[in-house]
Amino acid sequence: MQQKEPKICKKCKTNIPNIIIQKDPVCKECFIGYVEHMFKMSLRLKCNITQKNEKLLVCFSGGQNSTALVKMASDVVHSTCAHNKSKMFIEVHVLYINESFIMKEFIQEYQPQDYTNFVTNECKLPFQIVDIQSIYPDPYIILKQLHNLSEFGSAREDFVRLIKQYIIYDYAIKNGYQNVCLGQNGQRLAADLFSQLSKGRGLSLQSATKYNFSFIYPLNQQKLQILHPLKELLNKDILYYLRLKSNINFPNFILGQHLSNNVKNKPAHGNIDHLLEQFIDKLQEGFPSTTFTILSSAEKITLKPLQQQNYCPLCLEIRDQVYNRLEVETLDNSNQQLINYLRANTKYYNKICFTCNRMLQSAQEQENFYNLVGFPPLIVQIADLIQ
C-alpha cells in the first residue's frame, strides 16, 4: 500500500500545518506572521499611519477583537512580530471603559475582569481605565436612564454605545490623540453595516466600514480619525491568533439578556445587533466570500452631497431629514399628539436624528430625554453648539 505524503505548510514548505487559511494548510508560525503582516499593512497603507511618533489611541473592551488589536499593536511597537520584526515608531495608548457599574445592575452573575496585567505587563503599553459613570455628575442617573429605556430591541445597548463614544472622543481630544483605533474585524463591520441600515442610519455607512474615516469634533473643531485596522481579518483569524498568542478568557454578556422571559425567548435575546451578527456569521460559514463582498459593495456606495450638514448631538452623525411616508409612520409611532407636544415643548427634539429618535421613543419619560435632563454636561454643551 502506497503511503500518503505528509502534508507540509504551503508557505514555508517545512513545518506540519495545523491551520487552514483560504483552503491552504499553514503552520502556526506562518499563520501568526500572516495576521501580523495584514495588521501592519492595514495601518501603513489603508489607515495612513506612516509618520514617526504618530499617536494612536487603542480602544480596548476586553473582547476578542480588541484583545487581538492590543496584542498586535504591542508587537509592532516593540518589534516582537513573528517574522517581519521591523518596528513602527508610533505611540500607542490603550483606553478601557469600565462598564462594571451598569453590568452589575442588569446581570446578576457578572464578574468584573482585571486587564491591567495583560496590557501593562504582557503587552507593555500605557493603560488608562475610565469608569463609564464618571462622565455623569451623579453616577446613578445613567442607571435610571437605562431602566427608563425599553428592554426590547437594542435601545439600552445603543445608549451605552453613545456614552462610550463620547468618553472616547473626549479623552482623545484632551490627550492629543488624533487617531482612534477600534477593534471590529471584517465580520463585525459587515454586521454593523446591516445594523446601521436597519436602524435608519444610512448616512453613517462610511464611518461604519471605512479603514480610515475623518470627522470634525464639534466642541473644538479638531479633526479625529477613526481607524479599523482589523478590517481584513475574520472571526476565525482572530480566534486562531489569540489561541496561539494569549490565554485570556472571554465572557460574553448581553446587557438585556437577563431582564425578562419575553426578552430571553426572542432570537438573540431580542437584540437586533446580535441577531445580525449571528446572521452574518452563519452566512460566512457557508459562503466564505460573504464578509468581503458586503464590505467591498459598501465602499462603492456614494452619498449625495448635502447642501448643509447638520449633526445629531447624541451620536454625532449626520442628521438626515425624514423623506418618505414609511419613515414618518415609524417615527411618529401613531401618536402624533405626543410628537407635536415634544416638538413644541422640548429643547432638542428637532436636533436629534431619525435613529436616535427611534431609540428615545422607547423611553417612559420622553420629555426628560428630549430636554437632555440629567445628561452629562459634555453632551448638553455640544447640543447647544449644534444648529
Image (tube, grey):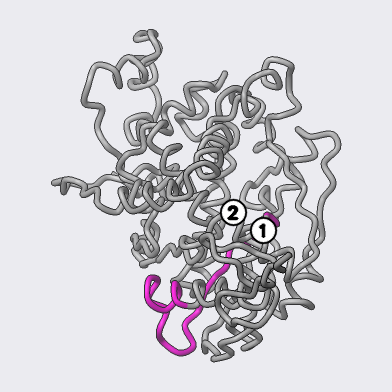
- The x and y percentages for residue 338 are 40, 12
Q: Is residue 134 within the magenta segment?
A: no
- The x and y percentages for residue 95 are 63, 65
In the picture, the quarter occupied by the C terminus is: top left
Q: What stretch is highlighted in magenta?
A: 41-63
Residue placed at 60% from the left, 67% from the top?
25
Q: In which quarter of the image is residue 102?
A: top right
- Observer-nearest of 224 and 133: 224
- The x and y percentages for residue 109 are 86, 37
Q: Disc 1 designates what residue?
A: 239
Residue 235 is marked as 2
Residue placed at 72% from the left, 68% from the top?
3
In the displayed structure image, the side of residue 108 where residue 17 appears, left or right: left
* Secondary-structure class at tag 2: helix
Residue placed at 52% from the left, 41% from the top?
286
* Secondary-structure class at tag 1: helix
Task: Residue 93: tell me if it is visible.
Answer: no
Q: How far apart are marks 1 and 2 (CA)?
A: 6 Å
- Observer-nearest of 348 and 287: 287
In the picture, the quarter occupied by the N terminus is: bottom right
Residue lying furthest left: 307
- Observer-nearest of 304 and 354: 304
Q: In this view, does 212 lie above or below 92?
A: above
In the displayed structure image, the side of residue 382 where residue 303 appears, left or right: left
Task: Residue 186: tell me if it is visible.
Answer: yes
Residue placed at 48% from the left, 28% from the top?
359
| Crowd class of label 1 (few under 14; some 14 to 19; many from 20; radius 10 Å) | some
Q: Are marks 1 and 2 in contact (CB under 8 Å)?
A: yes
Q: Which amino acid does label 1 sit on?
A: Leu
Q: What residue type is labelled 2?
A: Asn
